[in-house]
């Protein structure tokens, strides 16, 4: 029976061996996080490594630019912020065009500056395409945000060049701004813009949907547009009525609960899904428009015709 007693310890040894193998197999792969804190740290480290690669490639790209282009990139670096600057860098190292491309002016053409938020960013490239050979279309080096941001950064956005036309808007980011503050800031912005000697064109703010979760109401934009209209009337500034142009077409171009506009094709297409607006209306900004006239095209297919017509009557 001695062999039987010797077998029991052997069984125990085998059992322990199997358990050990199981424990080894159950261990996570080397480097895999074992808790949420480690997972977050690894994700942050991975992002930092990716950002470093992007920054290095972007710096190499900037180093090859002309002095004027490098100066423009420097302005963007100071203005685009933590959301838009990384997107811009990735676009540039991928060879993609975006709303903040450097614009090399044709001295024979008027210089147009677009000032506005992400909605205007959405129609910037489409506007450049529409006005190719007719105007040098620039964009402020930022998502311009509310009137408070405008007052703080306007001199940077205007730069040192002479502008023939400045097309501007502040509204969506001011939807919660008290009426008195909005009017006061808008007055100050208009006064500063008037000093440039450019033809000023106000773009009414496009419609937004009611969205309780974001504490936003469609009526807030109606009210801001009414306040802005009084300011523009006082200063004799014409209005590019983007609100009137888009209001009948929201089901076509505005996703539910979104303040932006999208379009897959046609004259409204902006080439990306972030934001898109009626590019055909903005084309009028490069035309010499009588200061008492409010306008918006009756058809999205009438871009060039309307622009040429406006240019002829100015």
Image: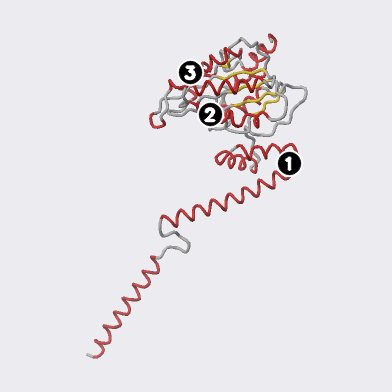
Q: Vertically, is 309 above or below 126?
A: above
The CA span between labels 3 and 1 is 42 Å
- Furthest residue toward left: 1
Report crowding for label 2: few under 14, some 14 to 19, many 20 or more residues within 10 A (C-alpha).
Answer: many
Dot 2 or dot 1: first in sequence order is 1
Circle 1 sits on which residue?
65
* SS at badge 2: loop
Q: Decide which of 270, 144 is in the foreground and name it.
A: 144
* SS at badge 1: loop
Q: Residue 160: horizontal and vertical position, in percent? A: 72, 29
Tell me what residue is drawn at x 45 percent, y 60 percent: 32
Q: Decide which of 182, 207 is in the foreground and name it.
A: 182
Q: Vertically, is 254 above or below 14?
A: above
Q: Vertically, is 82 above or below 35?
A: above
- Marker disc for residue 146: 2
Side of 229 where 18 appears, left or right: left
* SS at badge 3: helix
Circle 3 sits on which residue?
247
Image quadrant where one finds the C terminus: top right
Tell me what residue is drawn at x 77 percent, y 22 percent: 108
């Amino acid at each position: 029976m001695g062999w039987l007693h010797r077998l029991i310890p052997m069984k125990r040894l085998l059992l322990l061996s199997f358990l050990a193998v199981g424990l080894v197999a159950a261990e996570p792969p080397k480097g895999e996080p074992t808790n949420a804190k480690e997972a977050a740290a690894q994700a942050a480290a991975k992002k930092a490594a990716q950002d470093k690669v992007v920054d290095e490639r972007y710096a190499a790209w900037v180093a090859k630019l002309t002095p004027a282009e490098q100066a423009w990139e420097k302005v963007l670096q100071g203005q685009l912020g933590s959301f838009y600057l990384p997107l811009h860098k990735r676009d540039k190292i991928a060879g993609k065009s975006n709303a903040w491309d450097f614009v090399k002016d044709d001295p024979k053409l008027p210089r147009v500056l677009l000032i506005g938020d992400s909605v205007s960013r959405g129609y910037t490239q489409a506007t450049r395409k529409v006005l190719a050979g007719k105007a040098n279309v620039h964009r402020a080096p930022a998502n311009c945000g509310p009137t408070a941001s405008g007052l703080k950064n306007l001199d940077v956005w205007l730069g040192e060049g002479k502008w023939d036309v400045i097309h501007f808007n502040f509204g969506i980011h001011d939807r919660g701004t008290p009426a008195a503050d909005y009017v006061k800031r808008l007055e100050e912005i208009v006064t500063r813009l008037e000093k440039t000697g450019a033809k000023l064109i106000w773009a009414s703010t496009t419609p937004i949907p009611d969205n309780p979760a974001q504490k936003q109401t469609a009526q807030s934009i109606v009210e801001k547009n009414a306040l802005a209209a009084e300011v523009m009337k006082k200063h004799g500034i014409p209005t590019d009525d983007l609100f009137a142009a888009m209001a009948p077409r929201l089901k076509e171009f505005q996703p539910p609960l979104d303040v932006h506009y999208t379009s897959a094709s046609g004259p409204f297409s902006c080439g990306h899904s972030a934001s898109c607006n009626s590019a055909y209306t903005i084309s009028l900004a490069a035309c010499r428009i009588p200061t008492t006239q409010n306008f918006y095209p009756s058809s999205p297919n009438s871009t060039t015709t309307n622009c040429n017509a406006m240019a002829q009557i100015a």
